[in-house]
Image: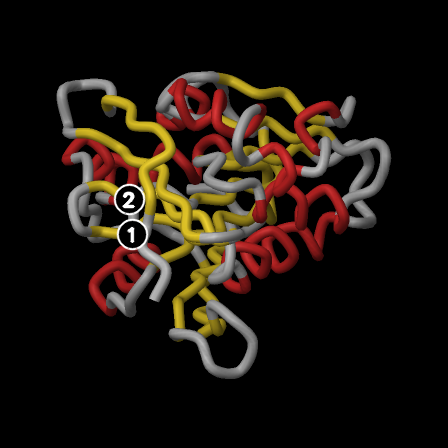
Amino acid sequence: MVPWMPVETAPIPGDQGTMRLLRRGDEFSIVVGIAELMNNRQRGSEQALGVLGCARLRDRPEPRVLIGGLGMGFTLRAALDTLGPSARVVVAELVPAVVAWARGPLAHLFAGCLDDPRVELRVEDVGRSIQSGAAQYDAILMDVDNGPEGLTRRANDGLYDAAGLKRARFALRPEGILAVWSGSPDRRFKARLQRVGFKVDEQRVRSHGQSGRRHVLWLATRPVATW
């Protein structure tokens, strides 16, 4: 077995530990502690987040999408491939080193998508982007931490608790979509989405082909009617 080799390390803002970029041959992994957050060979569910989160936006004029978490770019690339030329995609990434890796050792995975004129990259907490205005997004795609049961940063809990979901609902336009990726099922989170007023579709998606782990996607739609 070829061993993993360290490429770079970076602190997580807020004194929440260290993020490591590892390489084994042509395989890359982003790790915090013993938890793997991203692997370029296990990308199917991240791609599905981009496709399913944006598929219903094709007929909307100038759709605006927010992606929480840059990762290795698979959600962003899938969203751009799904959306038309009039779309605008904001990507909020908390860790500056992840952006540097995207333009450095992981640039081949991004295949130039950060230079797409439809993309605006912000180095900030996605919570700040969500709170920057009402009814501003047609879709919010969340791939932050390992899902609602965050492993790396307690502040991420504020994105997925009832108050955080209400803020996301407020930031969405009518019939806007909050799409959330998770490494595992969470019945309490699905119920929480419903309690704050979303219509929820839960899907299980393989991380790699037909043999990878099953990850969970929640596609939560804001109804047209307001409170």
Task: Indicate the position of residue 21 as horizontal and vertical percent values.
Answer: 36, 37
Q: Nearer the viewer, residue 226 or 51?
A: 51
Residue at the image point whose x is 72% and y is 31% from the top: 112
In this figure, which residue is indicated by the disc labeled 1? 36
**Crowd around label 1: few <14 · some 14–19 · many ≥20 (10 Å):** some
Residue at the image point whose x is 27% and y is 33% from the top: 19
**Crowd around label 2: few <14 · some 14–19 · many ≥20 (10 Å):** some
The answer to whether residue 39 shows anywhere in this view is yes
Q: Nearer the viewer, residue 223 or 103?
A: 103
Quadrant in the picture for the N terminus: bottom left
The answer to whether residue 147 shows anywhere in this view is no
Residue at the image point whose x is 15% and y is 27% from the top: 16
Q: Which amino acid does the dot numbered 2 rest on? A: Val
Task: Indicate the position of residue 26 as horizontal and vertical percent values.
Answer: 53, 52
Q: Which amino acid does the dot numbered 1 rest on? A: Glu
Q: Residue furthest front?
A: 2
Q: Secondary structure at mark 1?
A: strand
Q: Are marks 1 and 2 in contact (CB under 8 Å)?
A: yes
